[in-house]
C-alpha cells in the first residue's frame, strides 16, 4: 500500500509531495502507479522516476514552454546594474516550481553580484518556501543549496530547471529534487542560486562563492520570503555544489561579513582538481575532463592551455562552448584528453596544473561550523584531495566534523550521506552548538 511504503521511506508528507508531482505530470492513476513502483525501488527509483517525469515528453500539453535563459528577458542585466550594491534585488517574478502546481511558493530573483574580475554581473536565484510552518524557535531558516551546476552554458542553470525547463540540460537539478523536497518538508526556506553567473564560469571559485553569498543577501532582503533578523542561515552543496559552498564560506568574512551562517555542509568535495581530471580520463566520465579543459581555457586565458591544444582541441572549445556536464559525459565516453592536444600528458602538464591550482580550496579556513563528507571509494573525485583539504582546514583552526564514508560511488554517497548533512544543519537551526575543533563523524 502507498501509505505503508511512504512511511517506510520517511513519512507520508514526503510521499504525498512526490505523488502530487507525478500525478501532475502523468495524471492521477498513472502517477499513483509510478509512485508505488518508485517506493518499491527505493532511492535509486526516486531519482530515475523524477528525471523521467521532468524530461520525457508527456501528456500535459498545457505546460508552459520555458525559454532558455539566453532567450528570456528576465535575465538581461539592467542599464544601472553597477549602481546597485551586492545582493540588491534587481527584478523578481513568482513562478510555479518545476512548472507544476506544487504546494510550494516560488520566486525568481535577479540580483547584482561581482565576478572574480571585479565586474558587476546580474545573477538569478530561485527561492522556495513550503506551505508548512517552521516549528523551531526564531524565524524560518534559510538554506542556500548549491546544485552542481557543472556547466558551460546558462541552459544548464538550476533556475531554468526549477521554473519548468524541459530538456536534458535540467538533469543535474532534477537529481537534487529529493534533497530539495526534504528541506522544504522540514519547514526551511531554500534559495538556489545560479552561482556560475551569466557567463557560466565553472570552477571559478571567487565568482561562485560571491554568487552564493549575494544570492543569500537577495533572498534575505526579499520581504515575501519572510526571512527575519532571527532566522538562522545555512549552506549546503554536493560535488560542484560543494565547491561553490566552501568558496562562499571562505569568502564570507571579507565579502559578506553581515551574513552569519549557523552551519554549512559539503560533500563529494572537488579538491585536487587535476587529479579528478586524471581519474576520469579515458573512462565513462571522461566528459568531465573535457568540461575542465574547456572551462580553464575560458576562465584562465593567460594559462596558455588553449595553445597546447591541436586542431581537434580548438574545435572542441567552439563546439562545446555552451554544453552541460551531462551532455559532455554522453558525448565523450572513454575519450582521452591527449587526443585533443599536441602536448603529451596534457592533464599532467604544468600549465594545466597551474590553472587548476588557482581554483583550489584551502587558502583560508571557513569561520562557520562545517560538516564535510566524502566516499572513500568515490569513483569520480579521489578521496585523497578531500582528506588533504579537511586536514588543511583543521590546521587553520576550523570547527569541522569530517566523515569518510564507506558508501561506494560518488552518487550513492550523495544519497546516503545526505541524511547526516541535513541532520547537522537541522541541529544548527535548532540552536544546538556545533562540536568545537576537528571531529571524526
Image (cartoon, helix red, strand yellow):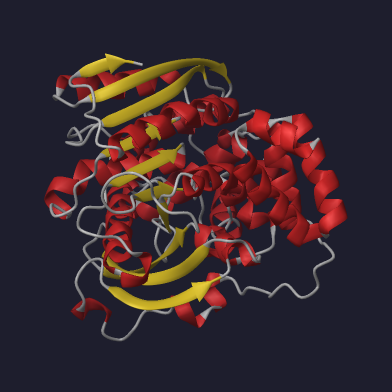
Q: Is residue 70 above or below residue 18?
A: below
The residue lying toward the viewer, choosing from 199 and 45, is 45
The count of marks equals: 0
What is the x, y in percent for residue 112?
Answer: 29, 70
Which residue is found at the position 75% from the left and 50% from the top? 52
Q: Is residue 353 above or below residue 91?
A: above
What is the x, y in percent for residue 170?
Answer: 62, 55
Left or right of 8? Residue 296 is: left
The residue lying toward the viewer, choosing from 347 and 104, is 104
Q: Which quarter of the figure is the C terminus placed in?
A: top left
Which residue is found at the position 52% from the left and 47% from the top? 180
The residue lying toward the viewer, choosing from 325 and 240, is 240
Left or right of 344? Residue 53 is: right
Left or right of 378? Residue 245 is: left
Which residue is found at the position 53% from the left and 31% from the top? 414
- Residue 345, visible in the rendered structure: no
What is the x, y in percent for residue 176?
Answer: 56, 45
Q: Which quarter of the figure is the N terminus placed in?
A: top right
- Residue 68, by quadrant, is bottom right
- Residue 143, visible in the rendered structure: yes
What is the x, y in percent for residue 202?
Answer: 43, 50
Left or right of 90? Residue 41 is: right
Amino acid at each position: 500500500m502507498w501509505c505503508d511504503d511512504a512511511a517506510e521511506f520517511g513519512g507520508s508528507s514526503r510521499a504525498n509531495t512526490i505523488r502530487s508531482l507525478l500525478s501532475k505530470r502523468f495524471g492521477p492513476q498513472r502517477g499513483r502507479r509510478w509512485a508505488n513502483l518508485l517506493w518499491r525501488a527505493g532511492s535509486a527509483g526516486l531519482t530515475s522516476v523524477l528525471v523521467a517525469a521532468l524530461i520525457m515528453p508527456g501528456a500535459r500539453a498545457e505546460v508552459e514552454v520555458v525559454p532558455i535563459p539566453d532567450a528570456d528577458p528576465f535575465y538581461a542585466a539592467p542599464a544601472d546594474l553597477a549602481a546597485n550594491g551586492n545582493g540588491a534585488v534587481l527584478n523578481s517574478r513568482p513562478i510555479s516550481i518545476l512548472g507544476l502546481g506544487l504546494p510550494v511558493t516560488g520566486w525568481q530573483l535577479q540580483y547584482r553580484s561581482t565576478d572574480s574580475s571585479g565586474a558587476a554581473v546580474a545573477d538569478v536565484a530561485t527561492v522556495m518556501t513550503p506551505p508548512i510552518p517552521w516549528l523551531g524557535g526564531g524565524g524560518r531558516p534559510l538554506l542556500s543549496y548549491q546544485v552542481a551546476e557543472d556547466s558551460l552554458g546558462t541552459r544548464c542553470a538550476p533556475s531554468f530547471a526549477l521554473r519548468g525547463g524541459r530538456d536534458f540540460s535540467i538533469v543535474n537539478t532534477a537529481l537534487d529534487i529529493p534533497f530539495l523536497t526534504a528541506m522544504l518538508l522540514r519547514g526551511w526556506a531554500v534559495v538556489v542560486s545560479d552561482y556560475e553567473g551569466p557567463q557560466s564560469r565553472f570552477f571559478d571559485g571567487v565568482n561562485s562563492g560571491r554568487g552564493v553569498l549575494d544570492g543569500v543577501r537577495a533572498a534575505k532582503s526579499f520581504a515575501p520570503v519572510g526571512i527575519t533578523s532571527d532566522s538562522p542561515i545555512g549552506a549546503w552543496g554536493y560535488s560542484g555544489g560543494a565547491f561553490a559552498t566552501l568558496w562562499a564560506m571562505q569568502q564570507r568574512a571579507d565579502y559578506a561579513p553581515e551574513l552569519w551562517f549557523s552551519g554549512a555542509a559539503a560533500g563529494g568535495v572537488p579538491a585536487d582538481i587535476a587529479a579528478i581530471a586524471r581519474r576520469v580520463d579515458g573512462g565513462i566520465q571522461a566528459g568531465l575532463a573535457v568540461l575542465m579543459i574547456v572551462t580553464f581555457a575560458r576562465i584562465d586565458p593567460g594559462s596558455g592551455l588553449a595553445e597546447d591544444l591541436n586542431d581537434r582541441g580548438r574545435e572542441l572549445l567552439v563546439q562545446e562552448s555552451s554544453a552541460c556536464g551531462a551532455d559532455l559525459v554522453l558525448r565523450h565516453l572513454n575519450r582521452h584528453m591527449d587526443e585533443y592536444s599536441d602536448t603529451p600528458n596534457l592533464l599532467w602538464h604544468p600549465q594545466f596544473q597551474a590553472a587548476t591550482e588557482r581554483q583550489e580550496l584551502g587558502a583560508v579556513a571557513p569561520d562557520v561550523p562545517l560538516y564535510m563528507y566524502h566516499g572513500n571509494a568515490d569513483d569520480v573525485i579521489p578521496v585523497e584531495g578531500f582528506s588533504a583539504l579537511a586536514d588543511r582546514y583543521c590546521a587553520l583552526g576550523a570547527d569541522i566534523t569530517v566523515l569518510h564514508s564507506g558508501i561506494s560511488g560518488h552518487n550513492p554517497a550523495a544519497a546516503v550521506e545526505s541524511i547526516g548533512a541535513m541532520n547537522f544543519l537541522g541541529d544548527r537551526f535548532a540552536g544546538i552548538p556545533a562540536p568545537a575543533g576537528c571531529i571524526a563523524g
